[in-house]
Image (cartoon, grey):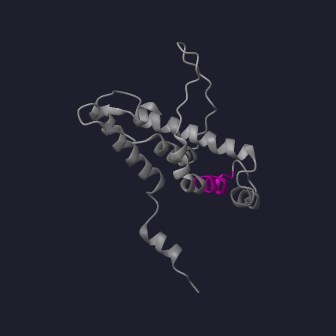
Amino acid sequence: MDQLTGVFDELSKAKLIDRNVDVYTNAPLIGFLYGRTADLDDLKNPETGQIYNQNVMGDRVIYSGDELQYNFWLIMLLDANYEPDEEKRIDKAFRHYGQDPADEERFDSYVRGGIDVLYEKLVEGDSTPEAFANRLYEFIDEFNDRFNSEISSNDILQLCVNKS
């Protein structure tokens, strides 16, 4: 998280992602789309003995609560691997929202998996400003090819038009 939100070019003060909460709100979707989950990491700093973790300020999470709730609903609705029964997925998303700790853990595992994907795609490798910019461009291009290449504006229009 530190490297995703840290300055990678001291001259321009450029960052890949501005705030931790921006990583937190986008990571579950990236994790889900890339099919990546991750377990909680209990790795400790050898000098301090504290578990490495990155906090997102509570007020930022509250401010982004609607977006996080929407992302939770999307994942509960779409994750047929987690819950094969469509009616139960609808229940998890809307009727029983926040009542099952396993659902929250599934969402959190996508957050962690998404952070891993973002780190691997955007940070790993050469640390020059040009390398960061190239990786960002490549990630956006890959994402577009992977998830948007088969969708046309006509397809979207057809979904929106009510045929009688």
| Residue at x 53% of width, y 46% of height | 59
- Where is residue 45 shown, x and y percent of the image? 54, 18
Q: Is residue 106 above or below residue 54?
A: below
Q: In the rendered structure, does residue 97 fall within the stretch colored magenta?
A: no
Left or right, 51 with reference to 105: left
Residue 14 appears in which quarter of the rendering? top left
Front in this rendered view, residue 69 or 142:
69
> What residue is rendered at 46% in x and 45% in y?
22
Q: Is residue 125 above or below residue 26?
A: above
> 127 left or right of 41?
left
The answer to whether residue 33 is above or below residue 57 is: below
Q: Residue at x 66, y 52 (%)?
A: 79
Question: Residue most toward the bottom?
Answer: 164
The answer, for residue 30, to whether it is visible in the render is no
Q: Position of residue 123 (x, y in %)?
A: 40, 32
In the rendered image, the quadrant that contains the C terminus is: bottom right
Residue 96 seen in the figure: yes
Q: Is residue 118 left or right of residue 126?
A: right
SS assignment for the magenta stretch, majority: helix
Q: Where does residue 83 sit, x and y in percent of width and height?
A: 73, 51
Residue 77 on the magenta span: yes
Q: Nearer the viewer, residue 149 or 12?
A: 12
Residue at the far top: name it: 47
Rendering coords of residue 129 (x, y %): 28, 33
- What's the magenta region? 71-80
